[in-house]
Amino acid sequence: MIRWLKEHFVPHKGNYHRPQFLEWGTVKYAVAAVVLIELVLFLLPTAHFASFIDKLNLSAVLPGALSTLTNDARAANDAPILAENVLLDRAAALKAEDMAGKGYFAHTSPEGRTPWYWFNLVGYQYSYAGENLAVNFSDSADVTQAWMNSPTHKANIISRNYREIGTGVATGTYKGSPAVFVAQLFGTPRSLAAVSGASPVPAWEMFLVSPHQSVNLILLALLALTAIALIVVISMPRSRHPDLIIHGLFLAAFIVGVYVANDYLSHRNFETSFIALDPQGEVQ
């Protein structure tokens, strides 16, 4: 490792006073690595072979992550943690799959099935129930943040009327383009029993919980390395090679461009919708 750092960042006689990090070969590898990461984490989950990615559980919008993020939001607002209920998970998955398969985004299906149809279908008897929907996201954290930025969705998420949660994600087509559909259901069973907190997201999934943030951290680290190499090259006369400076500036500009594009793409074309029901059956 020390030898690698010396060869790539420290100008010396052995590397002809040319830090290898800014050589064109290294820059090309860095650019290729960034492009590959972008393809895997951002383009594949929303491409036409999204169903293949979904089967591999590589979609960046993960049901377990959404449930954990929702409970994090509740904890931050002094609301009790919701227990993950397998019936609600199934109902949410069925609703998401129905939207994905038929290409609609609404609480009521084209056949007139209301949100409560899915609760009843799996046999979940509720005293309180609610539904949050989202479409066109590729990041679990972005879904939860969008819901929390909406007063109505936030009220649904942090409501103290609920005791349990279920989340479903499906890939399909919406308005002619591939899309990820999300349904999150909240409920309180008619017969209250002791409930345990929702399971946390497995450690191996944490990188995919928010790929935009994770990749942006990688980009910032790469940008820092590029800046260090540039400073070294510019500050030492014997290593001040114009081509290395040009390579470094190109790599820095590329990284900044990708970083800005990620922020733009993470907020484009998303939609959310919410509905809640009280014991008297009134929509609020």
Image (spheres, helix red, strand yellow):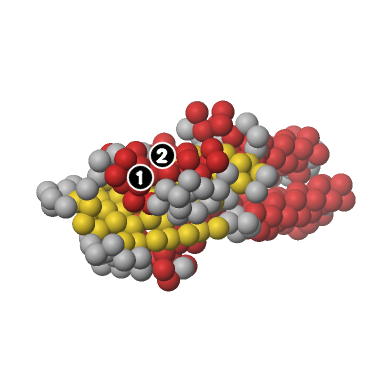
Residue at 25% x, 41% y is 123
Closer to the chain start, of discs 2 and 1, is 2
| 191 sits left or right of 139 in the view | left
Residue at 79% x, 40% y is 23
Is residue 22 at least partly visible in the picture? yes
Q: Nearer the viewer, residue 279 or 21?
A: 279
Residue at 16% x, 52% y is 190
Q: CA distance from mark 2 to mark 1?
A: 7 Å
Q: Which quadrant is the N terminus positioned in?
A: top right
* x and y, in percent, of residue 251 in the image: 75, 49
* x and y, in percent, of residue 247 in the image: 81, 47
Q: Are marks 2 and 1 in contact (CB under 8 Å)?
A: yes
Looking at the rendered structure, the kind of residue marked 2 is Leu
Looking at the rendered structure, the kind of residue marked 1 is Trp
Mark identifier at residue 171: none
* x and y, in percent, of residue 219 in the image: 62, 50
Which picture quadrant has residue 79? bottom left
Helix, strand or loop for disc 1: helix
Mark identifier at residue 118: 1
Residue at the outermost front position: 111
Q: Around disc 2, counting alpha carbons within 10 Å, would you say few (fewer than 14), some (14 to 19), or many (20 or more)?
A: many
Q: Nearer the viewer, mark 2 or mark 1?
A: 1
Q: Is residue 77 above or below residue 224?
A: below
| 151 sits left or right of 21 in the view | left
Q: Nearer the viewer, residue 13 or 39?
A: 39
* x and y, in percent, of residue 242 in the image: 87, 51
Q: Is residue 154 above or below residue 37?
A: below
Q: Nearer the viewer, residue 51 or 32?
A: 51
Mark identifier at residue 94: 2
Q: Which quadrant is the C terminus positioned in?
A: bottom left
Q: Is residue 48 above or below residue 145?
A: above
Residue at 84% x, 51% y is 246
